[in-house]
Amino acid sequence: MAWDGDDLAGQAEEVFERQQAVADARANRHSSTPAERAGSAKFESLRQSRSRIMGQLASATNPAHRKMLESALQSINDSLAAKD
Protein backbone atom coordinates (compact mmCIF):
# COMPACT_ATOMS: atom_id res chain seq x y z
CA MET A 1 0.00 0.00 0.00
CA ALA A 2 1.40 3.40 -0.97
CA TRP A 3 1.60 6.19 1.60
CA ASP A 4 1.18 9.83 0.81
CA GLY A 5 3.30 11.89 3.19
CA ASP A 6 0.87 14.79 3.18
CA ASP A 7 -2.04 12.51 4.10
CA LEU A 8 -0.04 10.95 6.92
CA ALA A 9 1.02 14.33 8.22
CA GLY A 10 -2.56 15.62 8.10
CA GLN A 11 -3.91 12.59 9.95
CA ALA A 12 -1.19 12.79 12.53
CA GLU A 13 -1.81 16.50 13.10
CA GLU A 14 -5.51 15.84 13.67
CA VAL A 15 -4.72 13.14 16.21
CA PHE A 16 -2.14 15.35 17.89
CA GLU A 17 -4.56 18.28 18.15
CA ARG A 18 -7.28 16.09 19.69
CA GLN A 19 -4.85 14.60 22.19
CA GLN A 20 -3.41 18.00 23.03
CA ALA A 21 -6.90 19.39 23.66
CA VAL A 22 -7.65 16.52 26.03
CA ALA A 23 -4.31 16.99 27.81
CA ASP A 24 -4.93 20.74 28.15
CA ALA A 25 -8.42 20.16 29.54
CA ARG A 26 -7.06 17.74 32.14
CA ALA A 27 -4.29 20.14 33.12
CA ASN A 28 -6.79 22.95 33.56
CA ARG A 29 -9.00 20.80 35.81
CA HIS A 30 -6.06 19.86 38.06
CA SER A 31 -7.43 16.32 38.25
CA SER A 32 -4.27 14.48 37.37
CA THR A 33 -4.22 10.92 38.66
CA PRO A 34 -1.17 8.66 38.43
CA ALA A 35 -2.81 6.88 35.49
CA GLU A 36 -3.43 10.20 33.72
CA ARG A 37 0.18 11.28 34.32
CA ALA A 38 1.41 7.97 32.89
CA GLY A 39 -0.89 8.45 29.89
CA SER A 40 0.39 11.97 29.39
CA ALA A 41 3.99 10.75 29.58
CA LYS A 42 3.24 8.04 27.01
CA PHE A 43 1.55 10.60 24.75
CA GLU A 44 4.52 12.96 25.02
CA SER A 45 6.92 10.13 24.19
CA LEU A 46 4.87 9.18 21.13
CA ARG A 47 4.64 12.84 20.08
CA GLN A 48 8.42 13.26 20.30
CA SER A 49 9.03 10.02 18.40
CA ARG A 50 6.57 11.14 15.73
CA SER A 51 8.35 14.47 15.39
CA ARG A 52 11.77 12.78 15.07
CA ILE A 53 10.51 10.31 12.46
CA MET A 54 8.82 13.09 10.46
CA GLY A 55 12.14 14.92 10.34
CA GLN A 56 14.00 11.82 9.23
CA LEU A 57 11.32 11.04 6.64
CA ALA A 58 11.66 14.51 5.16
CA SER A 59 15.32 13.88 4.35
CA ALA A 60 15.26 10.12 3.63
CA THR A 61 16.11 9.19 0.05
CA ASN A 62 16.60 5.41 0.24
CA PRO A 63 13.27 3.72 -0.60
CA ALA A 64 13.77 0.95 1.96
CA HIS A 65 14.56 3.47 4.69
CA ARG A 66 11.55 5.60 3.72
CA LYS A 67 9.32 2.53 3.89
CA MET A 68 10.62 1.67 7.37
CA LEU A 69 10.06 5.24 8.56
CA GLU A 70 6.55 5.33 7.07
CA SER A 71 5.74 2.08 8.83
CA ALA A 72 7.03 3.45 12.13
CA LEU A 73 5.05 6.65 11.64
CA GLN A 74 1.87 4.70 10.91
CA SER A 75 2.40 2.64 14.06
CA ILE A 76 2.78 5.78 16.15
CA ASN A 77 -0.29 7.35 14.53
CA ASP A 78 -2.28 4.19 15.28
CA SER A 79 -1.14 4.30 18.91
CA LEU A 80 -2.13 7.94 19.21
CA ALA A 81 -5.51 7.29 17.58
CA ALA A 82 -6.16 4.33 19.90
CA LYS A 83 -5.89 6.64 22.91
CA ASP A 84 -9.06 8.49 21.80
Image (cartoon, grey):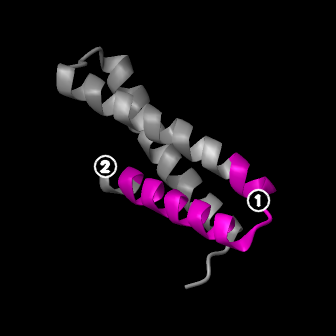
Residue 83 badge: 2
Q: CA distance from mark 2 to mark 1?
A: 29 Å
Name the residue type under label 2: Lys
Query: Is residue 60 one of those drawn in magenta?
Result: yes
Q: Is residue 65 left or right of residue 18?
A: right
Q: Main secondary structure of the magenta part?
A: helix
What numbered label is drawn on residue 60?
1
Residue 28 on the magenta span: no
Query: Residue at image x 39%, y 31%?
Result: 23
- Pick whichever, 50 or 66, lies toward us: 66
Locate residue 81: give its quadrant.
Answer: bottom left
Q: Quadrant of residue 75?
A: bottom left
Look at the image and give the residue range highlighted in magenta. 55-80
Instruction: Using the rendered image of the protein, determine whether residue 60 is visible from the camera's viewpoint.
Output: yes
Q: Amino acid at mark 1?
A: Ala
x 64%, y 59%: residue = 9
Which SS class for mark 2? loop
Residue 21 seen in render: no
Relative image position of residue 6 (x, y in whole percent): 70, 66
Residue situated in front as seen by the camera: 64 or 12:
64
Q: Secondary structure at mark 1?
A: loop
Nearest the eye: 37 or 59: 59
Q: Position of residue 21 (x, y in %)?
A: 45, 37
Q: Is residue 49 left or right of residue 34?
A: right
Q: Residue furthest top?
A: 30
